[in-house]
Amino acid sequence: MQKLYFGIVIQPGRRLDNEIMGIIRDVSRKYKTYSALKDKKRAHITLVYMNQLLTQKEVDGAIAELRVLLKKIKPFTVRIDGVRTFRKKYGRKVNYVVFLRPIPNNGMSTVHASVRRIMSPYKATWFNRFVPHMALARTDVNRKQFLGILREYRNFSFKRSFRVTAINAMTRRGKNGNWKVVPMKLG
């Protein structure tokens, strides 16, 4: 039985997605960083990414549980305010991440906590704290590229907002398969 890659994300509408993907393409072209560009091919805020593959039965069960829970959560607005960065160390390797910053709010925190509660039996990837972000460059960014991106985008003014009425589960067979999107409505 083939196992699936699985993630849960918040995605903006197409118009804002196109605008953000344009920024990601610009960063990729100028600084030769491509991981954010390949990432599900759409701008998104990751709520959970599984560090183990799931069976179709596990995915179906998680989505069914999430649908019930998400119906109890009201739609909310995400506001994006500028560019921020963080570094994450994995032994000797350092991942530099440059991202558009969604301002944390109760809606996002409630959804994240709910998703985390349901996904915890499946050994989902969690970080010490939830840092909502829409990556412009990540994982394939070295220090020199990071400093160049930072110089150019440190004072980049990008203030947008979008309404969240659904959370998307994403599944994919194999590393190079296409992502299948399963929308789950809020409220």
Image: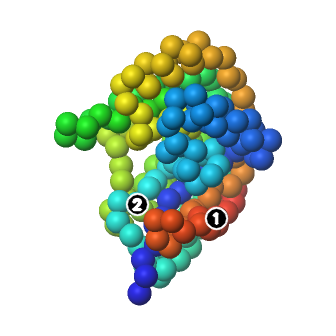
SS assignment at label 1: strand
Whether 27 is drawn above or below 57: the answer is: above
Q: Which residue is mark 2?
A: 50
Residue 163 seen in the current view: no
Residue 102 appears left or right of 138: right
Secondary-structure class at tag 2: strand
What quarter of the picture does the C terminus occupy?
A: bottom right
Among all residues in the image, which is located at the extreme bottom?
1
Q: Position of residue 108 (x, y in %)?
A: 56, 42
Q: Position of residue 141 (x, y in %)?
A: 42, 34
Is 37 on the left or on the right of 93, as rendered? right
Q: Quadrant of residue 64?
A: bottom right
Residue 93 point in image, percent of width and height: 25, 37
Amino acid on which the number 2 mark rests in the picture: Met
Few, some or many residues within 10 Å of mark 1 (<14, 14–19, 20+) = some
Other-residue count near label 2 (Cα within 10 Å), few / some / many at <14 / 14–19 / ≥20: some
In which quadrant of the rendered image does the N terminus lie? bottom left
Q: Nearer the viewer, residue 117 or 88?
A: 88
Q: Residue at x 44, y 26 (%)?
A: 145
Q: How many numbered tags mark residues here?
A: 2
Q: Residue at x 72, y 32 (%)?
A: 161
Taking the view exactly as shown, the residue that stands out farthest to the right is 15
Front position in the image: 178 or 52: 178
Image quadrant in which you'd find residue 124: bottom left
**Residue under circle 1?**
181
- Taking 148 as reference, is 137 above or below it? below
Q: How is the image coloured?
A: rainbow
x and y percentages locating residue 162 in the rendered image? 73, 38
Q: Residue furthest left?
A: 91
Say which residue appears at 49% left-offset and 45% top-offset: 35
Above or below, 123 relative to 165: below
